[in-house]
Amino acid sequence: MKILKRIIALIVVLAIGVFLFFNYANFSSGFRAGVPIKVSKKGVIFKTWEGQLNVGGLANSAEGAIPATWDFSIHGEDEHVREKIEEAVTYGKRVKLLYHEKFAKFFWKGDTKYFVHEVEVLN
């Protein structure tokens, strides 16, 4: 019985460790530049901030040429980031978005694995 309890405890500890790793660790960091075209608050129970950046150029699809866009999420506590992006959307400003890519996405955090943490308005 002792061995079974230890095995269960080990599995629980490992599961918690794996969850924390996927929740907090970054797979990559980088930036994208373009004109933000959308910022919206989405969700029924878990509200998340989502955005879309027009990175320029066109992508071919069955419907024809469509603008190349990049989807991203914003942490709820990063109000200054959201406000800068909203201003850029309003005035059509070009921005540089610095982001962290997570290993996995969780529905309560955002729709994407890309979380913008800093915004630089470009000339």
Image (cartoon, rainbow, N blue to C red):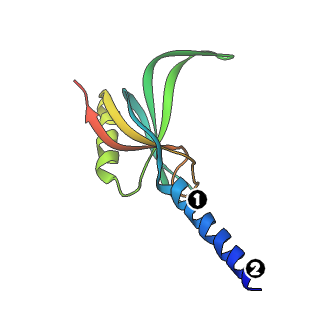
Q: Earlier in the sequence, mark 2 or mark 1?
A: 2
Where residue 60 sits, quadrant-wise, is top right
Q: Is residue 4 above or below residue 103?
A: below
Within-10-Å neighbours for mark 2: few <14, some 14–19, many 20+? few
Residue furthest to the front in view is: 3
Residue plotted at (43% across, 23% down): 55
Q: Which residue is mark 2?
A: 4
* Residue closest to the eye, 14 or 19: 14
Residue plotted at (51% across, 15% down): 58
The spot of residue 7 in percent (x, y) is 71, 74
Q: Secondary structure at mark 1?
A: helix
* Residue closest to the eye, 54 or 13: 13
Distance Cα–Cα, label 2 vs label 1? 21 Å
Is 89 positioned to the left or the right of 112 in the image?
Answer: left
Count of numbered circles in the view: 2
The spot of residue 84 in percent (x, y) is 29, 42
Within-10-Å neighbours for mark 1: few <14, some 14–19, many 20+? few
Residue plotted at (32% across, 31% down): 96
The quarter of the picture where the C terminus appears is top left
Residue furthest to the left in view is: 123
The spot of residue 110 in percent (x, y) is 52, 50
Q: Is residue 41 above or below residue 13?
A: above
Q: Is residue 1 above or below residue 7?
A: below
Is 103 positioned to the left or the right of 93 in the image?
Answer: right
The spot of residue 47 in percent (x, y) is 50, 57
Tell me the kind of residue under disc 1.
Answer: Val
Residue 18's disc is 1
